[in-house]
Image (cartoon, rainbow, N blue to C red):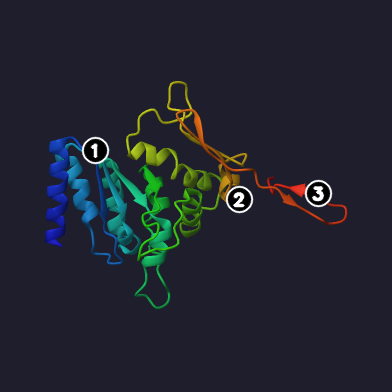
Amino acid sequence: MQDGAQSVKLLCEIAAERGLLVDMHCDESDDPLSRHVETLAFEAQRLGLQNRIVGSHLTSMHSMDNYYVSKLLPLMKEAGVGVVANPLINITLQGRHDTYPKRRGMTRVPEQLAHGLTVAFGQDCVMDPWYSLGSGDMLEVASMGLHVAQMTSQSAMRQCFDAVTVNPAKLMHLKGYGIEKGCHADFVLLQARDPVEALRLRAVRLKVFKRGKVIAETAPTVSRLSLPERPATTSWQI
């Protein structure tokens, strides 16, 4: 525990000295006593790194005492610590040593959002020994996140969509991000009318734009039906 806290301290000092952002894979454990995110928040305050530090995974928070978390979340908010949960990996790796009931393992996303923290979802592993099923599909990541966190209201699903779009851009301090005049024309055109439909249907990526130019393109998905008195085709959109 002491060595871990010291490593957090040293790495944050290096980042502060060099003017860099911090993304630290932290507390990726089922152990409720793994509390290095508290050190991360302290160092953010001490070194003036507010809103420049991100804690990734933070899965031990899922198993922490509720009273401790009630103190920890405001501390993280005050220190401007962002969060990246990795739903596909967290639900696969965490709780492996449990019998039943089995812990879900993903960090406390709804509670973090309620405290005003910036929360993003990541893929983490794509194809490696820990997870060999990844495709880099961020709609799949968001879908898993909303299921694990039970964020199934309309507003919560939109928060999950933000967790793979605007929130990562904010945590990464991306410049020129957004659909506004003067921003970089980097975007993905989805076969969906809104974020909820995009998540529900795992919408087809019709076109991918980079600096205003199409760099990838996929035909729309249309199903053909051969049923009496039914439409000949459907896209399954509402």
Sequence-first disc among 3 and 2: 2
Q: Position of residue 94 (x, y in %)?
A: 36, 66
Q: Which residue is at the front of the view, 136 or 100?
A: 136
Q: Is residue 175 shown above or below 233?
A: above
Of tags 1 and 3, the one toward the viewer is 3
Q: Residue at x 16, y 58 (%)?
A: 4
Where's the C terminus, which quadrant?
top right
* CA distance separating discs 2 and 1: 37 Å
Question: From what the image shows, is residue 173 above or below residue 85?
Answer: above
| Type of amino acid at the residue the image marks with label 3 | Ala
User: Going by the picture, which residue comes out furthest to the right?
Assistant: 229
Q: Are circles 1 and 3 on residues that touch, CB within 8 Å?
A: no
The 10 Å Cα crowd at callout 1, few under 14, some 14 to 19, many 20 or more, is many
Q: Residue 133: x, y in percent?
A: 45, 62
From the image, tell me which residue sits under label 1. 50
| Residue pictured at 45% horizontal, 40% vertical | 165
User: How far is disc 1 from disc 3 in space, using C-alphas?
Assistant: 56 Å
Marks 2 & 1, CB-CB < 8 Å contact: no
| Image point (28%, 40%), residue name | 80
Mark 2, residue position: 201
Q: Which amino acid type is shown beneath numbered disc 1? A: Gln
Q: Of 106 and 66, which appears nearest the observer?
A: 106
Residue 204 or residue 41, whichever sits in front: 204
Res. 232 mark: 3
Amino acid carrying label 2: it is Leu
Question: Mark 2 or mark 1: which comes first in sequence?
Answer: 1
Categorize mark 2 by other alpha carbons within 10 Å: few (<14), some (14-19), many (20+). some
Answer with mark 1 or mark 3, whichever residue precedes in sequence. Answer: 1
Indicate the quadrant containing the N terminus: top left, top right, bottom left or bottom right. Answer: bottom left
